[in-house]
Amino acid sequence: MKKLDYMNRIYDSGALAVVRATTDRVLEIAEGIVKGGIDVMEVSYTIDSAADSIKALKEKFGDKLLVGAGTVLDGETAKDAIKAGAQFIYSPIFDQEVAKLCNQYQIPYAPGCTSVTEAVNALRAGATFVKIFPYGGIVGPDLIKTMKTPIPYLPLIESGGVTVDNITDWLEAGTDIVGIGGALSKGTVDDIAQSAQQFRNKIDEYRK
């Protein structure tokens, strides 16, 4: 049931923070988003301290925060992230070995896909959500709407180009989860909390 619990928590949040920073800054960002009502974060493996950051987040926040690993491109990195305590895997690409490991360890996998065919193949391999990358942030919400028309059950994450001003457009187009980078990574803890609260309010308002 672990995978189902984590999947539901990601969906219930409706948003996750996409973070590329050193451990001290990651902890500050986490404090801000939790304070603002968003309790899901991925730590990018483009930063060498990613595994240490995941461990530190788990130690400090416990069940208050669902922590994932981002930019996971291969099985070796996925194993390292899972060992560090990652509760979901987030990636700009789809990789069969990563999908197998996530299924084995029963954690959600959200790969990046560039086409409808790749997205459906990722689902067949056990992906929990699909991130349309990189075209979502370039084309805009119409891309999500177009993909959802023939495949309404496709569970989509949009990461790139989501702001407080346009998040409702993404949700109306059929986006299930939004990944937010800069808007939840800049400023003080209170600044981040305020920004997170704005996204939280928009998501809750739409889902009502």
Image (cartoon, grey):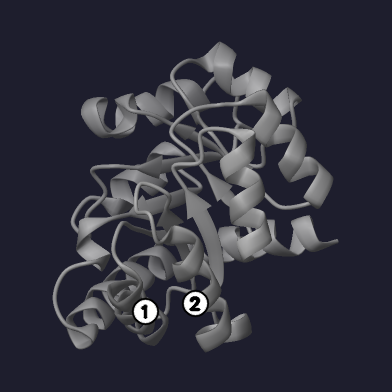
Residue at point 21%, 58% (across, down): 182
The residue depicted at 74 percent of the width and 64 percent of the height is: 5
Q: Position of residue 178 (x, y in %)?
A: 40, 51
- Toward the viewer: 78 or 123? 78
Of all residues, the one furthest to the top in this rendering is 117
Residue 130 place in picture, x, y as percent:
54, 35
Residue 27: image quadrant is: bottom left
Observer-nearest of 100 and 157: 100
Residue 160, disc: none
Query: Can residue 208 be seen from the camera position used here?
Result: no
Quadrant hosting residue 152: top right
Q: Are marks 1 and 2 in contact (CB under 8 Å)?
A: yes
Quadrant assignment for the N terminus? bottom right
Q: Earlier in the sequence, mark 1 or mark 2?
A: 1
Residue 75 percent across, percent down from the top left: 64, 35
Secondary structure at badge 1 equals helix
Query: Which amino acid type is shown beneath numbered disc 2?
Result: Leu
Distance CA(mark 1)–CA(mark 2): 6 Å
In the visual, does 190 lie left or right of 70? left
Q: How many marks?
A: 2
Q: Residue at x 48, y 22 (%)?
A: 147
Q: Which residue is mark 2?
A: 57
> Is residue 17 depicted above or below 110 in this figure?
below
Q: Which residue is mark 1?
A: 27
Residue 29 visible in the shown view: yes
Neighbour tally class for label 1: few under 14, some 14-19, many 20 plus, Cα within 10 Å: some
Q: Disc 1 residue type?
A: Leu
- Residue 182 is left or right of residue 79, and the answer is left
Q: Residue at x 31, y 34 (%)?
A: 141
